[in-house]
Image (cartoon, rainbow, N blue to C red):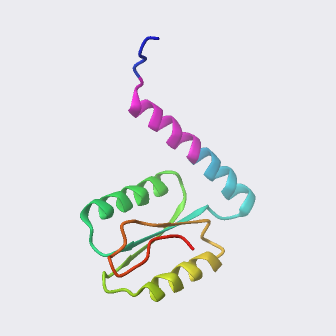
Amino acid sequence: MTARLIDGKAAAAAVRQRVAEVAAQFQSSAGRPPGLATVLVGEDPASAVYVRSKGKATAEAGMAGFAHNLPESTSEAELLELVHRLNADAAVDGILVQLPLPAHMDSAPG
């Protein structure tokens, strides 16, 4: 079997283009853009970079972005309350809670 070189930038651009097309179709049928909420708790530098890149990609795809940057002192109950509010928001179709969470929070699902 021979190795095949893949152009990662071209592949990523194609995926972004397809997402933008699907987002436009969604907006046409739903009357609003799809929405992604991001939640970052604390100030982990790598997590902040990742969440910023998701925000840029969301905007480039024509989606609505809702960024929530919470202090590290946020309680688990406050985080869960925010997630419940976002889940009930008709403008939000997806929620990304960025890991790792601060040590005082349980990041296990359930």
Q: Closer to the camera, 51 or 64? A: 51
- Residue 39: x and y in percent read 43, 72
Furthest residue in direction top, as rendered? 1
* Residue 26 figure quarter: bottom right
Question: Left or right of 3: which side holds 93?
Answer: right
Question: Left or right of 83: which side holds 106?
Answer: left
* Residue 70 figure quarter: bottom left
- Residue 69: x and y in percent read 37, 76
Total number of numbered labels? Answer: 0
Main secondary structure found in the magenta portion:
helix
Residue 63 counted in the magenta span:
no
Name the quarter where the C terminus is drawn.
bottom right
Furthest residue in direction left, as rendered? 45
Furthest residue in direction right, as rendered? 29
- Residue 30: x and y in percent read 72, 62
Question: Which residue is depicted at the point 47% across and 32% down?
Answer: 11
- Residue 78: x and y in percent read 46, 88
Q: Which residues are magenta?
A: 6-19
Question: Which residue is depicted at the point 56% across and 47% down?
Answer: 20
Question: Which residue is depicted at the point 54% across and 55% down?
Answer: 62
Residue 13 counted in the magenta span:
yes
Q: Closer to the camera, 19 or 110? A: 110
Question: Which residue is depicted at the point 58% across and 81% down?
Answer: 84
Q: Is residue 103 above or below residue 33?
A: below
